[in-house]
Image (cartoon, helix red, strand yellow):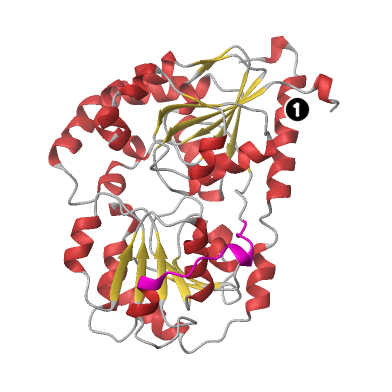
Amino acid sequence: MRASAAPRVAIAHDYLTQLGGAEKTVLNMSRAFPDAPIYTMLYDPDATFPEFRDLDVRVPLFNRIKPFRKNHRAALPVLPLVAQSIFIDADVVLSSSSGWAHGFRTNGRKLVYCHSPARWLYQPRTYLGDDGNALARFGLRAASSYLKAWDRNAARSSDRYLANSTEIRGRIADAYGIDASIVFPPVSRPPAEDVEPIAEVSDWLRGAGPDDAFYLVVSRLLPYKNVDAIVRAFAGTDRKLVVVGHGPQADHLRQLKTDNVVMLSHLSDGALAWLYRNCRAIIAASYEDYGLTPLEAGAWGKPAIALRFGGFLDTIHEDVSGLYFDEPTPRSIAAALDRFESMKFDRDKVRGHVEQFSQQSFAEKLHTAVDELAAQPIAARR
């Protein structure tokens, strides 16, 4: 479209207080629509990707309550009110949502890019884990009917849904009765010159040399990510594991891990790239919606060992870019490691698999969806 005729686009996201795949997707949305402001309920520039500091991020007064920026789960009872308080003046709002941003109000169209219908509503046991806080479980049960009604009304206020994977497309259909199109998030890697070695890991390897010397986990430390099962699979072995991430299970994992496991957090993109480039493989045992980390590792030619579930089925080509295990248990993971070490993977084929998940393809599909919505007559709105 000509610049003068292009729709005014805004981006919405639940909260920018973490380092994760959803936040990376928002950055990629911003690259596709560089003039679009970003609306969010909570923003902590020190806790998320530094690139957001250079973007037009807009927050409500609620963001001034600092404790909620550190722990958004504590604000759960009031978050529907906060979401509804945000009004966006735009022709099309591109809403990156896993529970809240699809409820932001607008006078334009609403195109929802769904990472998952709210886990705490539709998968509470997976979200909290079997050892989840009893008070949190009680609170969710008490508020579940109200929150589900709000969530489904928010979904109905949207004009179109996009899903980030086949798994999420099915969940959207189950939760809302909406048929969503699939648009895979993109993956990219920093230039080789931006890679930053991590002295702590090099020293820990005790001269073995970083290349192919360790396995890697990159994950938020939440119960459904099953990082504890991976850590247990390494106990009593001479295999080395690097775990990158932070979250409620961090202290538990520190107590659980053995000396052949090191934990890191809040790394720069360059430091993370160094780990991807030098690891033997990445391991993922989570009930994942999309499965971005196998692609991030694959961009460096490194294969993945992952749970045969959800988004990983979209992003891993079995026996070409990685292999699967069937249960998120230490025994199943250990058996997969044994199998992996008996195989050989072609790094060029791994990288070739990743090339289909490009920023250009992602941007083109978003622009097409936005232009189609903007072209609809007013009478076509929900």
The image quadrant where one finds the N terminus is top right
Residue 158 spot, x, y in % from top left: 56, 22
For image coordinates 19% across by 30% down, the residue present is: 139
- The number of numbered discs placed on residues in the rendered structure image is 1
Residue 265's image quarter?
Answer: bottom left
> Can you see residue 244?
yes
- Within 10 Å of disc 1 (Cα), the crowding (few <14, some 14-19, many 20+) is some
- In terms of secondary structure, where does tag 1 sit? helix
For residue 214, side relative to residue 254 (left or right): right
For image coordinates 44% across by 24% down, the residue present is: 152
Q: Nearer the viewer, residue 284 or 242?
A: 242
Residue 217 spot, x, y in % from top left: 40, 66
Q: Is residue 31 above or below residue 112?
A: below
Task: Name the chief secondary structure element in magenta.
Answer: loop
> Can you see residue 329?
no
For residue 144, side relative to residue 213 (left or right): left
Amino acid type, mark 1: Asp
Q: Which residue is mark 1?
A: 371
Is residue 198 magenta-colored?
Answer: yes
Residue 227 spot, x, y in % from top left: 31, 62
For image coordinates 38% across by 58% down, the residue present is: 286
For residue 140, side relative to residue 307 (left or right): left
Q: Is residue 222 above or below residue 207?
A: above
Residue 81 spot, x, y in % from top left: 35, 16
Residue 327's image quarter?
Answer: bottom left
Q: Is residue 353 above or below residue 287?
A: below
- Which range is magenta? 188-200
Q: Nearer the viewer, residue 277 or 268?
A: 268
The image quadrant where one finds the C terminus is top right
Q: Nearer the viewer, residue 214 or 335?
A: 214
Q: Residue furthest left?
A: 134
